[in-house]
Amino acid sequence: MSIIVRYFAAFREAAGLAEEHVDTTAATPAALFAECVARHSALERYTASLVAINDEMAGWESELSDGDEVLFFPPVAGG
Amino acid sequence: MKRFSVSAGPIDPDGFRRALVDPSCGAYVQFEGWVRDHNEGQQVLRLEYEVYEPLAVKEGLLIVDEAMERFEISRAAASHRSGLLELTDVAVVVGVSAAHRGPAFDACRYIIDQAKLRLPIWKKEHYANGAAEWVNCRHCAEAGHAHHP
């Protein structure tokens, strides 16, 4: 299935891009992130803290669907 | 006043007090987060906040609504900056008015604590030595922590 992956802050800098379209069989954000780390080795140094799907906060074991936009957030630091 | 907003320009802290005044309230608590000149032994010159606004606003509103439900308060609002900030600039404001001070303190604390945990906001500190780092991610990188899960 086709998924849009978006990276923010440190993830964007580590991956070297803000967004990519991927064809994947990953069933969950956790599996998808592992694929992203395999493609962009600099991501390996970072911990992913939160994930969102289609602008809704989601769990790492949520089910992915064709056409989803998955947002990977590095550890947040507001305030 | 919006219950939660992301502001690209300076936040007026006094505006919160004016907007949250309520004749049924005997207490008003306001928290301001400021840009300080040091962090973990480094001299900080300025910082920038990256905000993913669609979700930050959605989650920020949810946090304020949760505080309204959990505590005996009358009104609450919060705002967070985005973009480049200089020392002493106001980064975040939370204001809560209530009949009594206890719930006002508790709700204010709840909102700022949850905001720090849940809002998709990232802080990059610019240091006197010319370096710039995303806060928190530096620790991950140095500690060599594995990514989730």
Image (cartoon, coloured by chain):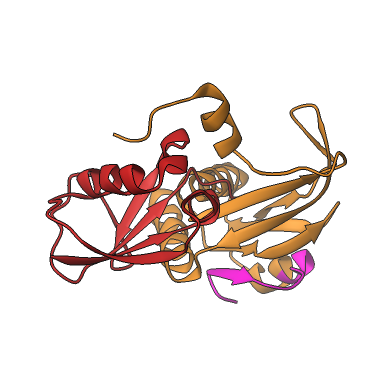
Chain colours: A red, B orange
What segment is highlighted magenta in the picture? B1-15
**Residue B25 appears anywhere in the view:** no
Q: Nearer the viewer, residue B97 or B66?
A: B66
Q: Is residue B116 left or right of residue A70?
A: right
Residue at 67% over, 73% down: B19
**Residue A9 appears anywhere in the view:** yes
Q: Which quadrant would residue A56 be assigned to in this image?
A: bottom left
Residue B131 at what x, y percent from top left?
77, 42
Q: Which quadrant would residue B136 be assigned to in this image?
A: top right
Residue A48 at what x, y percent from top left?
40, 42
| Magenta residue check for B4 | yes
Residue B17 at what x, y percent from top left?
72, 65
Q: Nearer the viewer, residue B7 or B65?
A: B7
| Magenta residue check for B37 | no
Is the residue A41 above or below the residue B142 in the image? below
All told, the count of numbered labels is 0
Is the residue B62 above or below the residue B23 in the image? above
Residue at 44% over, 71% down: B54
